Image (cartoon, rainbow, N blue to C red):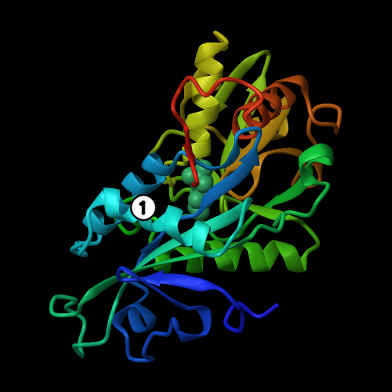
């Protein structure tokens, strides 16, 4: 179904407008230069009713992105948290994806961005499994992309900025055409960075490793898994990882709001471990599912109910 032609409401600068009326001019600065930022947030319909997972953390990263790009937010964090809840409620959805967006209008011509207005919108829609419905149980096949992540002084990877996704798009288009589900990107030094919309973890001899925060987006699901590992007393290191270390891992998996926790069973035509999702990833998947579906107490305060 078209993303433009739908029933429902999108929150734009404080008002819920009809979905089809939420438009931006072709000469908007964001459209021309890619300077905008966004979030991807999930609502789960758990045992106590619909709740947003880690709303405050996503909203904080949304504001961090604005700060990195020097886009002055016309709203406070609490207002954007409320906007997300209001948009879910207005659309009557119980389990969905939330997409807050920050963007410039087209007041000015030219590269300096000052003088353009900053606007915020929040859209929500029913969620589709982007890696396919069997990915979480069966695992996915991944290929290292010929495109690398930008140098840390070229891309501000802690900003979830629109323009960064050209890099992810080139990578996923390349590997999809070759028959793989997702692409692994290396950083500008050749170390493992992340996949197109997720962070990566490896397990070998019971030790979990994940790339340092240098060239990656600091994923909230990555933090969720690191929290689980710490709570379980599992050894986890943030360090430089090479591509061939991944080939010899016992387990590999990716984490992200859309992919949740998904095993990688094949990388660059090498079978990982015994080719099936391993015990570590299954443990984290269960812990994640128990939290978001409300099967266990939310003792970390990660769920915000949608009234
Ligand atoms: N890296 C990139 C490039 C992403 O787009 C995402 C998705 N937001 C992630 C990692 C995972 O982040 P999170 O767990 O916060 O969704």
Residue 152: x %, y % from top left: 34, 50
Question: Horizontal placement of 64 versus 129: left or right?
Answer: left
87 relative to 206, above or below: below
Q: In what element is the residue under mark 1?
A: helix
Q: Which residue reaches farthest front?
A: 307
Which residue is painted at 58% across and 38% down in the image? 200
Mark 1 neighbour density, 10 Å: few (under 14) some (14–19) many (20 or more)? few
Which residue is labeled 1 in the image? 82
Question: Horizontal placement of 113 versus 57: left or right?
Answer: left
Total tally of numbered discs in the picture: 1
Which residue is painted at 83% across and 47% down in the image? 134
Residue 176 appears in view: yes
Question: Horizontal placement of 197 versus 252: left or right?
Answer: left
Residue 158: x %, y % from top left: 35, 48
25 relative to 257, above or below: below
Residue closest to the eye, 116 or 171: 116
């Amino acid at each position: 179904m078209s993303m433009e032609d739908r029933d429902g409401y999108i929150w734009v600068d404080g008002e819920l407008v009809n979905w089809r009326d939420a438009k931006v001019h072709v000469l908007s600065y964001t459209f021309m230069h890619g300077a905008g930022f966004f979030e991807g947030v999930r609502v789960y319909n758990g045992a106590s009713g619909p709740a947003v997972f880690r709303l405050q953390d996503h909203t904080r990263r949304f504001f961090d992105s604005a700060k990195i790009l020097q886009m002055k937010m016309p709203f406070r964090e609490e207002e954007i948290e409320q906007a997300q809840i209001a948009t879910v409620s207005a659309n009557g959805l119980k389990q969905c994806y939330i997409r807050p967006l920050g963007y410039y209008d087209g007041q000015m011509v030219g590269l300096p961005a000052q003088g353009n207005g900053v606007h915020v919108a929040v859209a929500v829609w029913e969620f589709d499994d982007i890696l396919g419905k069997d990915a979480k149980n069966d695992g996915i096949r991944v290929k290292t992309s010929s495109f690398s992540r930008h140098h840390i002084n070229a891309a501000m990877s802690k900003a979830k900025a629109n323009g960064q996704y050209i890099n992810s798009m080139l990578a996923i288009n390349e590997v999809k055409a070759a028959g793989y589900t997702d692409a692994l990107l290396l950083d500008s030094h050749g170390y493992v960075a992340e996949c197109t919309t997720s962070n990566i973890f490896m397990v070998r001899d019971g030790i979990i490793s994940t790339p340092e925060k240098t060239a990656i987006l600091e994923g909230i699901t990555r933090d969720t898994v690191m929290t689980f590992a710490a709570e379980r007393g599992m050894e986890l290191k943030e360090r430089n990882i090479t591509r061939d270390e991944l080939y010899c891992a016992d387990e590999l998996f990716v984490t992200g709001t859309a992919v949740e926790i998904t095993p990688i069973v094949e990388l660059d035509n090498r079978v990982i471990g015994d080719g099936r999702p391993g015990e570590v990833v299954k443990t984290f998947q269960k812990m994640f599912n128990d939290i978001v579906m409300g099967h266990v107490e939310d003792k970390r305060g990660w769920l915000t109910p949608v009234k």
